[in-house]
Every structure is written in structure tokens, then in C-alpha cells.
Amino acid sequence: MTAGSLAPTTRPTARLLLIVHPTAGGGRGARVLPEVVATLRAGGADVVSEQTRSIDHAGELAARAVAEDRVAVALGGDGLAGRVAGICAQEGGLFAALPGGRGNDFVRGLGASTDPLRAASEFATWQERAVDIGYVTGPDGVRHAFLGIASLGFDSDVQVRANRTRFIRGSSVYTYAALRTLAGWRPATFTVSVPGEPDQTLVGWSVAAANSAYYGGGMHYAPTAAIDDGLLELVLAERSSKLHFLAMLPKVFSGRHIDDSRVSVRRARKVSVDADRPFQVYADGDPLADLPAEISVVPGGLRLVGPPIAQG
């Protein structure tokens, strides 16, 4: 039995605070807001909406939702969802996410529609359950919550480029950023430490610790990761030629890259990571910590309102 299945699912309260990132996805969140609110209300919800002024303001709105006994519903990208989820986990509140950003990878992993109006129309059927939440802790000791995949190395450089790119919209920005980053990339040496196991030295592309299965706008990078198993999926990409990397890149979208001999997968509840040059650990599209960093998961640490679990 998984951590998330220990508690029975229940229908959520119909009181919602919709936390909107107005510029996410090229302004998608703000554009669809009126229709999303109308759709949720048509489904019987009591909806209050607020647009965020900053990521810290998003956290304040999430805390307000908990205090007012409302579901904190993030309408934006994965970064907004991660911040709102972290506050809900801290305060014991209910969290939900609707797609409104470029990647929408957490929503995708739940099996929900990445169309905000369709997801809103199905919200009345969603249920509460306990799921895992990840944390990244850097040298300063500050712990940052995340929902998806925390990664470093090549992924860090790709995220930097993707976040600076303005002329490409949608999830294709991540593929573009990967190809541009590839040209100047050189292998890094990573140290991966799991409690109770010998340290591992890895020369290669990246280290990723996955709480859920997707990142990078639909890349199925950790296909066997589950948000209710109490563990992180560690995906380690060893050194290979750039031509080999290019051949493997399309397989990331189907998850078949993990069958490659240069990719290994293991599981842990906690991992410490470092490298021979500076990288930031990225998760949910945002930089969370410098190295060295600890990545961990709290089983059942988040009360999620999401689509019913598929049976069979």
C-alpha cells in the first residue's frame, strides 16, 4: 500500500481561493481567469480570485486560503504551484493546481487536462488525497518545497536559458534551450550521497530527484516516479557523446530514455548532491538552492485535491 493510499479519498470543500499568476504562460493565466472562475462557479464552487504580485505574495495568499478554510488553487505555472503547495503543506491546508503556465508538468502528471477550462469543468469531480512533497535544502539551511523534479547539471543550464527566452512560447522553449545549451556543454563530476549507501561519483550530464514524473513541458523524465510512494526517483545521466545525447533526446518524451545504458535509476527518501563546478538546483522551473544541496521527500505531506485515481 502506498503512502497516498493510507487515507481514503474524500470530496473537497467547494470554497476556493484561486491564486493567479497573471503573466505565466505569456499571460495565459490572466486571459482565461474570467472563464475559469465562471466554470468553477457553474460547478457549484464558492470562488474568490487574487492575482499575485510576486512569488512571496503567492505564499501569503496560500496562507490566507488556509486561514479562511478554502482550497488554495494555483492557476499558473509549476513554479507557482510549488510555492502554493509548500505553504499548504506547512499549514495543513488543501492544495490544487489548474494549468496556466508553459509546462504544466505537475497537472499533466496527475492525469488532468492541460487546458484550463476543461480542467476547471472537471474540478467538481476531483477528490482529496495525501501525496508526497519534495524539499531542497541548500548551504544556507533554508528548505524549499517542490512538486515535480529537482535536477542539476545540464538541466540547470537549460533552465537558465529557457527562463531567459522570450521569443518562443509554450513548452517547446525547453527543447530549444536544450539544443542551444548542448553546443557548449562539457561533462561535470557529481557526488551523489544516499544515507546508508556508499557515495557515488558520476561524470556526465545531470542528476535528478523526482517526486512526480514530468518536467520541461512534457518530458517524461522519471516515468516510474509516483507522488504517493514515499520515495524520490533518482535519474542519473552519465557521460556520452553529444551525438548520443541528440539521439536520446526524443526518447525523453516517452520515457524510453531510461532504457539507455548511460542512464540509471534508483530510489531514495533523501539524497545529498554536489558537483565540481557551481550549479543551482532547479525544480518546478525555478532555481531553489546552490550546491551542495540535500533533496528529500515527506511522504503524505501534502493534502491534494486532484483527479480521481484511475482504477485498474
Image (tube, helix red, strand yellow):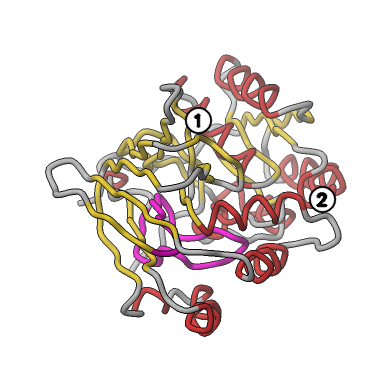
Say which quarter of the image contains residue 117: bottom right
Residue bearing the label numbered 1: 86
Label 2 sits on a secondary structure element that is helix
In terms of depth relative to the viewer, which is nearer, 90 or 11?
A: 90
Q: Is residue 251 above or below residue 74?
A: below
Boundaries of the magenta span: 204-226
Check residue 28 in the rendering and tell me which mark sits there, or answer none. Answer: 2
Say which quarter of the image contains residue 233: bottom left
In terms of depth relative to the viewer, which is nearer, 66 or 103?
A: 103
Label 1 sits on a secondary structure element that is helix
Q: Residue at x 61, y 48 (%)?
A: 285
Q: Residue at x 68, y 45 (%)?
A: 43
Q: Is residue 200 magenta?
A: no
Q: Is residue 202 above or below residue 17?
A: below
In terms of depth relative to the viewer, which is nearer, 88 or 283?
A: 283
**Residue 190 point in image, percent of width and height:** 36, 52
**Amino acid type, residue under disc 1 in the picture:** Gly
Q: Is residue 118 above or below residue 223?
A: above
In terms of depth relative to the viewer, which is nearer, 69 or 234?
A: 234
Q: Earlier in the sequence, mark 2 or mark 1?
A: 2
**Residue 66 point in image, percent of width and height:** 55, 20
Q: Is residue 166 left or right of residue 108?
A: right
Q: Is residue 212 magenta?
A: yes
Q: Residue at x 63, y 17 (%)?
A: 64
